[in-house]
Image (tube, rainbow, N blue to C red):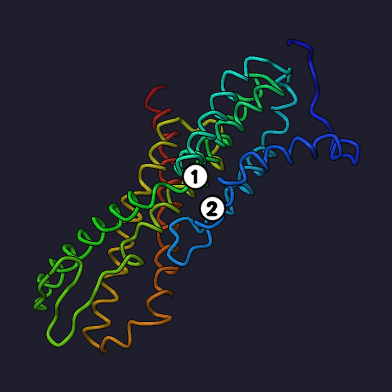
Amino acid sequence: MSKAITFPTLSPRTIAAWAPWVAIFLLVFWPALTWMAARFEAADSFYSHGWLIPLATGWLIWQRRGTLAAARPAASFSGFWLLVPALLIHVVATSIDLHFVSGFAMIVAVWGLAWVLWGWRVLWTLRFPMFFLLFMVPLPGVLLIYISFQMKLMAATLATYFLHWINIPAVQAGSTIQLPGVSIIVDDTCSGLRSLISLIALSTLWTSLMPLSSPKWQRVTVVASSIPIALAANMVRIITLVLITVIYGPKAAEGFIHYGSGIVVFGIALIALAWLTRGLAGLRPSVAGRAG
């Protein structure tokens, strides 16, 4: 199909025309959606930011509204080559309870549906928002638990080395740091995995705010740097909590101090990310000057 079409306006008639298709999509992917919602709302969730991803994606699409109009949307049967396999994978994955596979299949189905309705040009124009949707699909729990455990061990090891460096006797036993008269457990909250996942998603979104002329390597650097920034910020949090425990006792590091410190440290990580972005932006004039 090659007949040119335009994006419909959001009128009552348009809403009525689209409502059945939206209902069918929700019905087909309801198992994946309910699984993701449960993961978002879980007390120990690593993906509490998941609800924000569709909203951020909508904003990213709105940013490109002018480019979309120039993309000459045209319906295309080629999109079924992406849509149909995604639906089949979803059905199989749901039948064997591989919900994370079903979640990724749902995102691919969104890509395929956009291709069918508006064509490849529109899909290519929306490649960044469509890619960003992947951040709302939680990874398998077993994988997250393993990564969190390894991060806890690393955090406990580094904290113990730091305590030795400042002449505080400490012994590491797994994710536990034994101090004179008290033992400190580096739990899942302090592993840093939650803030790491959130900061990677946020840094990816952050790159959309960079000037269009920014080189691709700068955008990649911002996203890649979110990993060491998140790990370093979490280490500062753990060491601070350990020192508070040593000086004021274990009760002082509980409650608001324990959870509030995570918010403060995440804010510091954002500041570091902003500083890095500004520093990278300042490199371009000097590079251009040398090239001239």
Image spot of residue 161 (x, y percent):
12, 66
Contact flag, marks 2 and 1 (Cβ < 8 Å): yes
Q: Helix, strand or loop at disc 1?
A: helix
Q: Residue at x 60, y 25 (%)?
A: 83
Q: What numbered label is drawn on residue 12?
A: none
Q: Helix, strand or loop at disc 2?
A: helix
Q: Residue at x 50, y 31 (%)?
A: 89
Q: Residues within 10 Å of mark 1 (few under 14, many from 20)?
A: many
Image spot of residue 211 (x, y percent):
55, 37
Q: Residue at x 46, y 30 (%)?
A: 215
Q: CA distance from mark 2 to mark 1?
A: 7 Å
Find residue 82 and report its image quarter.
Answer: top right
The C terminus appears in which quarter of the rendering? top left
Position of residue 177 in the picture relative to residue 79 (left or right): left
What amino acid type is highlighted by mark number 2? Answer: Gly
Residue at numbered disc 2: 50
Q: What numbered label is drawn on residue 135?
A: 1
Relative to 211, is 42 above or below?
below
Position of residue 9 in the picture relative to residue 97 (left or right): right
Position of residue 130 in the picture relative to residue 25 (left or right): left
Residue reaching furthest top? 2
Mark 2 / mark 1, whichever is N-terminal: 2
Of 98 and 155, the residue lying toward us: 98
Find residue 179 and report its image quarter.
Answer: bottom left
The N terminus appears in which quarter of the rendering? top right
Image spot of residue 289 (x, y percent):
41, 28
Relative to 45, is 278 above or below?
above
What amino acid type is highlighted by mark number 1? Answer: Phe
Q: Residue at x 54, y 53 (%)?
A: 50
Image spot of residue 286 (x, y percent):
40, 34
Total labels: the figure holds: 2
